[in-house]
Amino acid sequence: MANLIDSASLNRVLDEGVSLIDVRYKLGGKEPNWGKQAYKKGHIPSAVYFDLNEDLSAPPKEHGGRHPLVDIDKFAKQLGDSGIDSSTKVVIYDDNAGAFAGRMWWMLKYIGHKDMMILDGGYSAWLEAKLPIETKIPNCQPCKYDLNIQKDLLVDMEYVKANISKLAILDARGHKRYLGQNEHLDPKAGHIPSALSFPYTDNLIDNKFKSKKELKERFKDFKKEQEIILYCGSGVTACHNFLVLDSLGYKNLKLYIGSWSDWVSYPDNPIEIGA
């Protein structure tokens, strides 16, 4: 499927100018440095590390959600410092079935990057294939990253609020969080009115993406040209649904990056509980 590469295929092109980005991470805040430590203990050869909190998100404020959009100039500089320019072929991996790699993939798409893929199955699949790893931190040749921001891929709370009941709004969180039965991260439970429950985990089987045929069936009720707003808890796992829909040829996709954690920061915003 488009936007994905398997371990064997990646191994064959490792020496052909591919840049690898490791985005392993653990949500919840209890082990904020887990991903960095895991990277230091071993990573796919030549991979650089980007941290979800520090490199792919801005510090949280009153509004904007738990993982606001990072300063794009800072992001571009880090890419350039990592030897990545706008023409570089990039492969991203995590160890969470694409949950965090999807955010990095979307960030690249947002700044106009064209050639990026996610390693299907992530670091675990690489290890299971008994492919090489290293602990060496790569010595990258710095370059300049030229931005080409795609503003139409991003929407804010006001846009979502103005279009409730007019557009398809898909919630990537677990179904119990959508129903308001289990909320352990944000102060209010429930979902945005009219939103549909589409947990990102249902894109997966055994920590890999389902087949294109299965995923087409999952999203068959949506037209390729219709506008679809994607959200989750904080603009991370919604990118998983974004990536899948993009792979299937949907062209009018928009990420509400603040997502539920931003939505509930406004006391007057409506909330629905249940199906």
Image: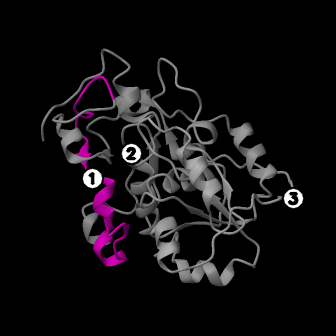
Left or right: 262 as drawn, with respect to 109 = left
Left or right: 65 as drawn, with respect to 131 = left
Please tell me whether mark 2 sits on a helix, a strand or a loop. Answer: strand
Q: To which residue does mark 1 refer?
A: 198
The mark that comes first in sequence, 2 or 3, is 3
Q: Position of residue 104 (x, y in %)?
A: 57, 52
Measure how far apart labels 2 and 3 are at the Cα level: 38 Å
Above/below status of 148 relative to 194: below
Tell me where the magenta segment starts and ends, as one range: 186-215
| The stretch drawn in magenta includes residue 236 | no
State the mark number for residue 141: 3
The answer to whether the residues at label 3 and label 1 have Cβ atoms under 8 Å apart is no
Q: To which residue does mark 2 refer?
A: 229
Image quadrant where one finds the C terminus: top left
Q: Position of residue 42 (x, y in %)?
A: 62, 62
Which mark is nearer the camera, 2 or 3? Answer: 3
**254 and 167: which is toward the camera:** 254
Residue furthest out toward the left:
274
- Name which residue type carries label 3: Gln
Left or right: 42 as drawn, with respect to 200 = right
Q: Residues within 10 Å of mark 3 (few under 14, many from 20)?
A: few
Where residue 1 sits, quadrant-wise, is bottom left
Q: Position of residue 257 (x, y in %)?
A: 47, 38
**202 and 47: which is toward the camera:** 47
Q: Position of residue 159 (x, y in %)?
A: 43, 32
- Name which residue type carries label 2: Ile
| The stretch drawn in magenta includes residue 197 | yes
